Amino acid sequence: MEILKELSLILDEKNIYINEMMSKHTTFRIGGPADFFVTPEKVEEVCNIVKLCKEQSIPYYIVGNGSNLLVGDKGYRGVMISLYKNMDEIRNEGNHIYAQAGALLSKIGAQACALGLTGFEFAAGIPGTLGGAVMMNAGAYGGEMKHILESATVLTEEGEVKTLSVEDLQLGYRTSIIGKKNYVVLEAAIRLEKGEESQIRAYMNELKEKRVTKQPLAFPSAGSTFKRPEGYFAGQLIDEAGLRGFRVGGAQVSEKHCGFVISNKDATASEVVELIKQVSDRVEEMTGIRLEPEVKMIGEF
């Protein structure tokens, strides 16, 4: 109750949820209750919530669309800070797009297309927010965030709001300085090029068709489950290990794309974790290559 009182001094009552089921806020549709789920609307509120959590030694986690996240069945003991929807402002200046961390990549892609700006097409179909995309240097179809990012404004561990250049962000394969130093992405500047709207839209539709054809979009998942081993494709290794369609309870290796673990018939988080372990063990046994999960796993399983 003391934490609720402190949060109420920072946020309006409508922005604070108690024992909120995280299954409502992840694309896996899996996850138990978070002690507190808060939806700040301003940078100042984010800073104050993080400051409170640090001062009170309360665990906290920044969540966007929950598209790369698996929350344990027993939930999350702490504060989930959601930037999705409330902090999703997008603005344009010339060839630049400035967007807050909670803006969906699809929304940014649609706006870029309408403005006749090219370069963001690869990201427009990724079901996540800008903050998560910057943190993990999201990529698809040959493109990566590091190719179009100019800078990102972050909240540091020390409570300072500062802007980092793309070089400062140290973007690598599904990694950045943000995760390493526990920064919080607040906004990012994206630099694109002038193009023809019709051509941009055609390319976006082409990539969308590839996703629909090759990915198991009809089932809840957290997207690509495993990181790509250098020189290999995770899905191919899993397929060659004879694990296409392999199941643990309601969790299943997708028959459409073996790189995806899907929830088929209401999988639990523990079933997903066990499936990931068994797949990794089998692939390592057969190839000597250990697959690492790309999905973030938090909470109590």
Image (cartoon, rainbow, N blue to C red):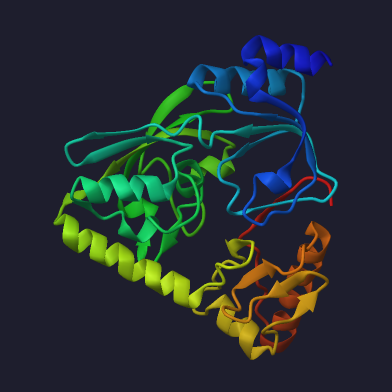
Q: In the figure, 237 relative to 36: above or below?
A: below
| Image position of 264 (left or right of 239) | right
Q: Is residue 141 visible?
A: no
Q: Is residue 21 visible?
A: yes
Seen at 22% across and 59% down, the residue is 200
Looking at the image, which is closer to me, 169 or 272?
272
Looking at the image, which is closer to me, 273 or 181?
273
State which quadrant residue 188 falls in: top left
Looking at the image, which is closer to me, 65 or 119?
65
Q: In the figure, 260 relative to 12: above or below?
A: below
Q: In the figure, 128 relative to 2: above or below?
A: below
Looking at the figure, which quarter contains the N terminus? top right
Seen at 78% across and 45% down, the residue is 299
Seen at 79% across and 50% down, the residue is 72
Seen at 56% across and 73% down, the residue is 229
State which quadrant residue 272 falls in: bottom right
Count of numbered labels shown in the rendering: 0
Residue 244 locus on image (x, y percent)? 67, 84
Residue 166 locus on image (x, y percent)? 35, 43
Residue 256 locus on image (x, y percent)? 57, 80
Looking at the image, which is closer to me, 59 or 254?
254
Residue 62 locus on image (x, y percent)? 61, 37
